Image (cartoon, rainbow, N blue to C red):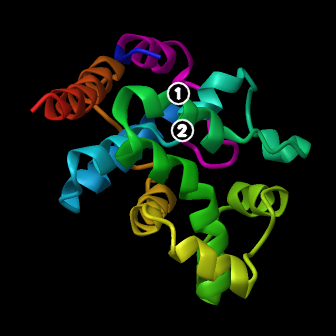
Amino acid sequence: MTPEQITALFAEHGDLCYEGEGITQLQHAWQCGRLARQARATPELELAAWLHDLGHLMTGLQGSPAQRGIDDAHETLAAQALSGLFGAAVAEPVALHVRAKRYLVAAQPRYAQALSPDSVRSLALQGGPMSPAECEAFLALPHAQDALRLRIWDDHAKDRGQRPASQNRVLVEMSAAMRAVIDGQRV
């Protein structure tokens, strides 16, 4: 995928709603990217925050696949699309953000209580809480800490009260985040 194709995908399908969340895919991406920027994430991790759910748009499935008992493997689709263009520092936290949820549910019992209903449904489809051995293996992965940060932003980026000024403005900001990573790789 090219940055232009990613932007076009969000322009065309970014209005898909998160079932029961009251926000769209584009609003969620924007909120997550803003949370990463506020946390002073690297440009790569900020871009991962923007694009972590790109795979949902790539599947063509409407609404919540989890409600229909489908694990759309969105994290894998997105990571594969992003890897060649942006590298591992973007693709790996995206690939691991679902496993990060599974880890957090296992490691922090209160975390599960704060999950949205759709996240609870998808958690069951994605394997449920990790075992102690899975937790240990996850934490040993090179991008596990970034995936955990991304996961927390992902969970908090569902605020119905935070709306961007316009779709066009969001797409411009997303494009700028992509350009910052591409330009940084050329240094």
Q: Is residue 19 magenta?
A: yes
Q: Label 2, secondary structure: give it.
A: helix
Q: Amino acid at mark 1?
A: Ala
Give the answer, above or below, for where 21 lies relative to 185.
below
Q: Quarter-wise, where is residue 99 in the image?
A: bottom right
Residue 81 has which mark? 1
Residue denoted by label 2:
79
- Percent coordinates x, y for residue 71 in the rendering: 80, 45
Q: Are marks 1 and 2 in contact (CB under 8 Å)?
A: yes
Q: In the rendered image of this protein, does residue 16 appear above or below residue 41?
A: above
Q: Is residue 27 left or right of residue 77?
A: left
**From the viewer's perspective, is residue 152 above or below residue 67?**
below
Residue at 18% in and 32% down:
180
Q: Residue at x 35, y 48 (%)?
A: 89
* Up/down of 149 relative to 97, above or below: below
Q: CA distance from mark 1 to mark 2?
A: 5 Å
